[in-house]
Image: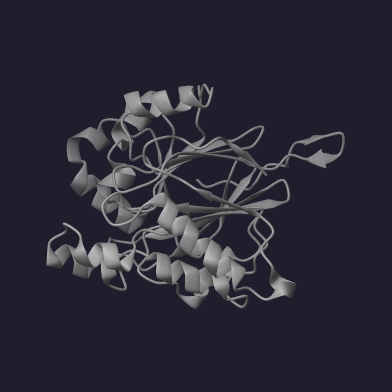
């Protein structure tokens, strides 16, 4: 049963926030570790055991215990390593009912043998794991029941949203007030159009249940009514290796942020998550 939040820990009266470690982000595997002093959550499990442990070692982190594994949706780059993660950490799995059904179909034997507990979650219904309050929300993507997440602990907020074809107003509302925002900037429109993907795949990526382009992200970032500009860390994520590159995504975002009104200037740090290597942990 999903629990209420425990009280936040503090040091000399100061609340401890969140530490965010993005181990990988892209079409070949997505995995993020979120921590407070007392709680550890894994969001998605798109890498295998060996690579996950190597990424943790690269940022000098040893994870002996997890309080939960959250899955955004059932596509392989977000859940391919889930059976190994469940076997290694024996943590409860958090997923919507439709996503869980899809996971059972995608990973039939490997998943069932390793489940140690399942918590069914619902978009729009907040819940707590330890001292982290989790709020799942619906996103437009071609999977069973895809969700993004916001996380609150110690007075700070982190939002994670990738794999969405466009930015609905409701998603923008959920992202407001984030101290750290992990946002998809998947493809460059011109690179995708002339790239190696078959036309049917290009159509899927470009659809309203596909992936966000650099252009779509730039329009969101430039709009002060959409993006509030409050994030200390803005992280571009899920960048396509075939149809984008980190420099292009960054330049597009920087140009958009430069178009914001002076009174809503973005003063945080713009970062880019990659598939090849983990990012240095961010302390909120």
Q: Residue furthest right?
A: 12
How many marks the image carries: the answer is: 0
Residue at image point 44% right, 52% down = 247
Camera-side residue: 274 or 204? 274
Q: Horizontally, is 39 left or right of 140 in the view?
A: right
Where is residue 198 drawn, in percent x and y?
12, 61
Where is residue 81 drawn, in percent x and y?
30, 35
Residue at image point 69% right, 67% down = 265
Where is residue 94 drawn, in percent x and y?
43, 46
Residue at image point 27% right, 62% down = 191
Any part of residue 92 in sight = yes
Which of the 4 quarters of the picture holds residue 37?
A: top right
Q: Give the quarter of the figure containing the C terminus.
A: top right
Q: Horizontally, is 23 left or right of 197 in the view?
A: right
Any part of residue 121 in sight = no
Colour scheme of the rendered structure? one colour
Camera-side residue: 186 or 165? 186
């Amino acid at each position: 049963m999903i629990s209420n939040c425990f009280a936040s820990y503090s040091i000399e009266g100061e609340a401890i926030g969140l530490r965010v470690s993005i181990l990988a982000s892209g079409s070949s595997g997505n995995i993020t570790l979120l921590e407070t002093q007392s709680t550890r959550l894994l969001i998605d499990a798109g890498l295998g055991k060996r690579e996950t442990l190597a990424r943790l070692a690269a940022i000098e982190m040893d994870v002996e215990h997890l309080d939960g594994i959250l899955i955004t949706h059932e596509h392989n780059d977000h859940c391919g390593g889930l059976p190994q993660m469940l076997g290694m950490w024996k943590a409860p799995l958090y997923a919507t009912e439709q996503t869980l059904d899809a996971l059972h179909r995608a990973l039939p034997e490997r998943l069932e043998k390793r489940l140690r507990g399942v918590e069914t979650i619902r978009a729009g219904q907040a819940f707590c794991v330890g001292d982290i309050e989790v709020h799942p929300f619906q996103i437009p993507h071609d999977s069973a029941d895809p969700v993004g997440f916001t996380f609150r602990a110690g007075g700070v907020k982190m939002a994670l949203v990738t794999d969405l074809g466009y930015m609905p107003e409701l998603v923008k509302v959920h992202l407001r007030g984030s101290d750290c925002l992990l946002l998809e900037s998947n493809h460059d429109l011109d690179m995708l159009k002339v790239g190696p993907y078959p036309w049917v795949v290009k159509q899927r990526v470009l659809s309203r249940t596909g992936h966000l382009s650099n252009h779509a992200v730039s329009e969101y970032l430039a709009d002060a009514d959409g993006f509030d500009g409050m994030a200390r860390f803005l992280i571009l994520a899920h960048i396509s290796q075939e149809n984008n590159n980190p420099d292009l995504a960054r330049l597009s975002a920087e140009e958009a942020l430069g178009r914001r009104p002076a009174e809503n200037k973005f003063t945080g740090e713009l970062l880019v998550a990659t598939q090849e290597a983990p990012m240095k942990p961010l302390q909120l």
